[in-house]
Image (spheres, grey):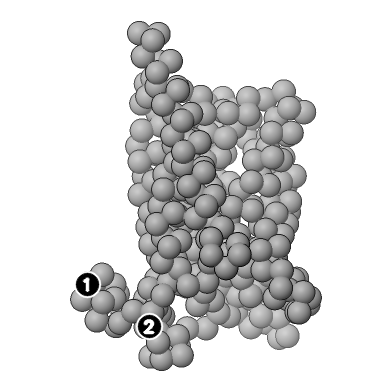
Amino acid sequence: MLNISPIALRLGPLNIRWYAILIALGIAIGILMSCKEAKKIAFSRDVIIDFVIYTLPLGFLGARLYYVIFNFSYYLANPAEIFALWHGGLAIYGGLITSIVCLFFFCKKRKLSFLKFLDILTPSVLMAQIIGRWGNFFNQEAHGFTTTKSFLHSTLHLPNFIVEGMNIDGIYYQPTFLYESLWNLLGLLLILLLRHWKDFYCEGEIFWQYVAWYAFGRFFIESLRSDSLMIFNKIHISQALSFIFFFLALFYLLQKTNRKALKK
């Protein structure tokens, strides 16, 4: 059994967790990616930095509020845990929705293209999600239902450190954090490969492709998770949102495709 510690560094009384390091790393790489893309299309990098400074704390707040609201009974009984971000509990959908709302008002105030800004940021969001999910691995959370060591080794062919990291209190669990990280990685590679092909994407389509891609994968991955946020103890909240977002994105992309076809 591998001893997975959620703590990366101990500096006196201060414990620095892998969860925090990986989230910070994902955000940092994402910012660099957005700045590089902004430069390519003559978009101000300073605007990217201004938006990040303005939105980052609100995005974290939205991600945490979403998680707390849908875990209300637990946090009502343990109110001090509301502020214990190092224990995990940041909901991606909460952070994304908050950040998109912030971006809308930011673009309106600065007189910028909302859809173009979304397209610039989309690969960065995927990168942050890819890296950030590994924080769940070190926290031993966001895993799936029970499984066997043989399934992880022989069927999925996972390296031993992941297999043993999924051994929690003597029970093996499905690494749903890994499924989502790899799904996002594939989506990122596709976007990076296609986004500069001439006339392949119209403004806003990179973002909506991301929404469709992420929502499709999350819908199925969420059904494997054992710690999903639920409504009425029956409906997976993230699965329901994924269903809605996927068809919204599909509708948008089909509409844009039809308009492009009519113009030819």
The C terminus sits in image quarter: top left
Pick the front one: 107 or 156: 156
Do we see residue 50 in this rendering? yes
Secondary structure of residue under mark 1: helix
Side of 69 relative to 175 (left or right):
right
Q: Position of residue 188 (x, y in %)?
A: 41, 45
Q: Position of residue 46 (x, y in %)?
A: 68, 35
Q: Position of residue 181 (x, y in %)?
A: 42, 59
Secondary structure of residue under mark 2: strand
Neighbour tally class for label 1: few under 14, some 14-19, many 20 plus, Cα within 10 Å: few
Q: Which is nearer the N-term, disc 1 or disc 2?
A: 1
Residue shown at the point (43%, 15%) measured from the top left: 259
Residue shown at the point (73%, 85%) measured from the top left: 13
The N terminus sits in image quarter: bottom left
Pick the front one: 222 or 27: 222
Dot 1 amino acid type = Thr
Do we see residue 136 in this rendering? no
Neighbour tally class for label 2: few under 14, some 14-19, many 20 plus, Cα within 10 Å: many
Residue shown at the point (58%, 46%) measured from the top left: 31
Residue shown at the point (24%, 81%) measured from the top left: 150
Q: Tell me the residue that label 2 is attached to.
A: 172
228 is higher (above) or lower (below) than 52? below
Dot 2 amino acid type = Tyr
Q: Which mark is residue 155?
A: 1
The answer to which image quadrant residue 200 occupies is top left
217 is higher (above) or lower (below) than 114? below
